[in-house]
Amino acid sequence: MRFPISIMKVREQSMFPSLNDGDYIIVSRWSKCKANDVVVAKGSGMLLVKRISKTEGARYYISGDNKQESKDFVVGKEEIIGKVIFKL
C-alpha cells in the first residue's frame, strides 16, 4: 500500500532558491498537479524535484527554478509521484 503523504529530502540545487539541497519536503500523492506546481517525478533513472512549466494532455514539462543548474524534462502523468505541499 502506498501512503498518500511522503517526506522526502531534496538532493540537488535545481530548485534554488525555492528549495535547497538538504531541505525536507512533504509530498502528496493525491493532489492534482497543474502548471506552476512543484512535483516529484521519476526521470532519467532518479527522482526529480521540479516545477511544472506546462501540461499537454498526459505530458508534463518540468524544469528547475535554478536555470544554471537545471535541465528540462518531459514526463508522463504516470511518472509524477506527487505534488510538493510543504517545505520543512
Image (tube, grey):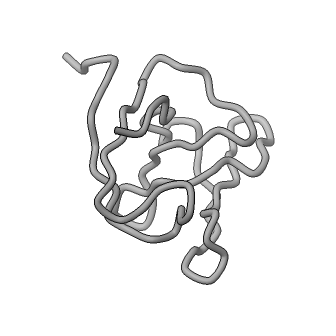
Q: Is residue 2 left or right of residue 4?
A: left
Residue at image point 56% right, 63% down = 17
Q: Quadrant of residue 34?
A: top right
Nearer to us in this view, 23 or 49: 23
Figure quadrant of the C terminus:
top left
Determine whether 75 is above or below 33 in the image: below
Please state the horizontal and vertical placement of residue 32, each as a whole percent of the image.
61, 21
Q: Quadrant of residue 48?
A: bottom left
Q: Quadrant of residue 26?
A: top left
Figure quadrant of the N terminus:
top left
Determine whether 72 is above or below 5 in the image: below
Q: Is residue 50 left or right of residue 9?
A: right
Residue at image point 48% right, 36% down = 84
Please state the horizontal and vertical placement of residue 36, each as a whole percent of the image.
72, 42
Please state the horizontal and vertical placement of residue 38, each as a whole percent of the image.
57, 43
Please state the horizontal and vertical placement of residue 82, each as a whole percent of the image.
46, 33
Give the residue furthest to the left: 1
User: Count of labels shown?
Assistant: 0
Residue at image point 58% right, 37% down = 77
